[in-house]
Image (tube, rainbow, N blue to C red):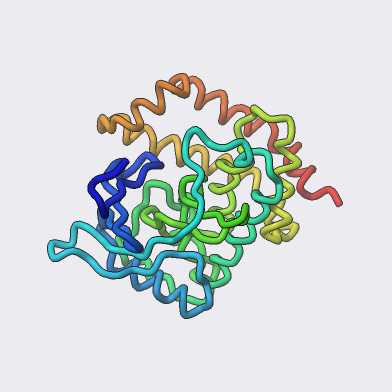
Amino acid sequence: MSGGPDVEVMHGGMDNASSVVRRGDTVERPAPAHALALHTHLRALATQGFDGAPTPLGLSADGRRERLTYLHGDVPVPPFPSWTWTDDGVLRSVAVLLRRLHRASAALPVDRAVPWRTGLADPEADTTPAEGLVLCHNDVCPENVVFRDDVATALIDFDQSAPGRPLWDVATAVRYWVPMSGEGPRTLARLRVFADGYGLDAEGRAGLPPTVEQAAATARAFSERRVRDGDPAYVRALAARGGWASWDLHQEWLAAHRQVFTDGLLDG
């Protein structure tokens, strides 16, 4: 959809719908309340050699919108292409990209005093020692990953970033990308592909299934708040999903398969 000869309205995702526009090599979008701190972090990631994030270009005069570099590539949006859920090479590349982000983030200080968005954040961040935290992306869904030649090369939309355990970011990502929905026969196999691509050690593999359950509960609470506030995108998504009963079944399925996933991740 075009907003003029030099403006393209960007689609995808549930937040900021129709509010993100591209002007040539620049993206303009609503700025989160913590935009200044987030921009500082994104620039610092580049100094650590991480080139998989947009470069901040500044804020509007009223601080309500931000400008970032446009990252060229392919971003899967609904209706998702089949390779989103079937190509193990694609899945592995997402894991590798997330690991690169965390390695760069680990070298940077995390300021807990910044009012980072907390809706999808790690609930254990406040009790985790600072050396065990990175600034997690928290929303590595298909619509926030840029691909070139079927390889994940960049992440976009860092709005939900907040301090957390690296394993938390892995858990939130595999929920989307495996996906951890109980619908596919290769759930465990793809879970192992992601764990291998990221390089999870035995402790991380053992902790991943319960952390996925924790992430699912956090995502549900986030959705409940948005539905309660009348957010039309989340109201529609809940209806399409089949209501809260489907969330109940999802969380029950995760709990019932916790040991199967743990054993499968640790096998070999």
Along the viewing direction, whichever of 21 and 5 lies nearer the viewer:
5
Left or right: 105 with respect to 65? right
Report x, y in % for residue 237. Answer: 40, 28
Along the viewing direction, whichever of 192 and 23 lies nearer the viewer:
23
Left or right: 169 with respect to 63? right
Left or right: 86 with respect to 245? right
Report x, y in % for residue 241. Answer: 47, 24
Q: In the picture shown, does residue 228 fall above or below 127?
A: above
Tell me how many marks there are. 0
Report x, y in % for residue 190. Answer: 71, 43
- Which of the 4 quarters of the picture holds residue 238? top left
Left or right: 236 with respect to 140? left
Report x, y in % for residue 127. Answer: 48, 60
Along the viewing direction, whichever of 158 and 82 lies nearer the viewer:
82
Q: Quadrant of the N terminus?
A: top left
**Which residue is at a point 35% across and 66% down the rendered structure image?**
38
Q: In the picture shown, does residue 2 fall above or below 135?
A: above
- Considering every residue shown, the one lying at the far bottom of the view is 47
Along the viewing direction, whichever of 250 and 137 lies nearer the viewer:
137
